[in-house]
Image: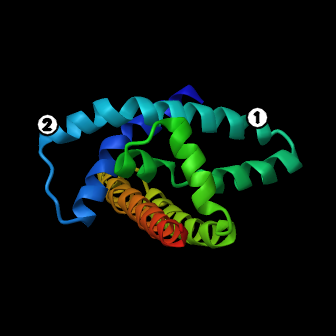
Amino acid sequence: QFTLAVIIALQSPAVYLVIRASRNEQASRAAVIGALITFGPRFFTFGLIISLTIGLLSLSSFGLILAVYLAIRVTLVAPAIVLVGLCVSGGMRGCWQLVQGRWLRTFVVVFIVTVFAGMLMFAAASLPAVGDQALITLIAVSIAQGLSAPLVTLVESLMFEEYRQSAEKSLP
């Protein structure tokens, strides 16, 4: 769980860059380092909370179903942290409210994107990794990961923005 939390923390600059790129904004190296310093601890904390919770829940069949439910309810925390600057608890509360009434739609979209990303990774990792092919496999896996990670981040960010705008419109 700790390793997963570290990996999630290291994704913070990538989330930041994808969001900036989706808005046609450029980012400097200093901004990327700043994103890691600013958002990394929040992503780490969120990663630790969610990995421990889902890990414990996954010990039973009912817990596994509950873990999927909870994971979808907080799947938009990363964009909430980067776009709005929320703390972990604020991001989790905000995402919980945004996904309210949209759980199935969020699940379907996240499922489709995750399956697509998984297929890319599986196809790349399935290349024979022997002899001279090992370098080709490494390159293929790197390309697949380089395509899938920003895709997942972009989809989550767009959903977050859409849900947030919809919620603001429904306020009196």
Q: How far from the left and from the top, in percent, is residue 70?
A: 70, 50
- Closer to viewer: mark 1 or mark 2: 2
Callout 1–callout 2 Cβ contact below 8 Å? no
Mark nearer the N terminus (1 vs 2)? 2
Q: For this view, does 74 lie left or right of residue 141?
A: right
The alpha-carbon separation of the residues under discs 1 and 2 comes to: 38 Å
Q: How far from the left and from the top, in percent, is residue 65?
A: 80, 54
Q: For this view, does 78 lie left or right of residue 135?
A: right
The kind of residue tagged 2 is Ala
Nearer to us in this view, 146 or 140: 146
Residue at position x 51%, y 37% in the image:
88
Residue at position x 74%, y 48% in the image:
67
Q: How far from the left and from the top, in percent, is residue 61?
A: 87, 49
Crowdedness near tag 2: few (<14), some (14–19) or many (≥20) residues, C-alpha within 10 Å = few
Q: How far from the left and from the top, in percent, is residue 63?
A: 83, 45
Query: Would you identify the image quadrant in which residue 11 lies?
Result: top left
The kind of residue tagged 1 is Leu
Quarter holding the C terminus is bottom right
Query: Would you identify the image quadrant in which residue 34 lies?
Result: top left
Crowdedness near tag 1: few (<14), some (14–19) or many (≥20) residues, C-alpha within 10 Å = few
Residue beneath label 2, please? 30
Residue at position x 46%, y 39% in the image:
8
Nearer to us in this view, 171 or 55: 171
Q: Secondary structure at mark 2?
A: helix
Residue beneath label 1, please? 56
Image: 102 above or below 2: below
Extreme top residue here?
2
Q: Would residue 132 be seen by someone viewing this image from the given angle?
A: yes
Nearer to us in this view, 64 or 133: 64
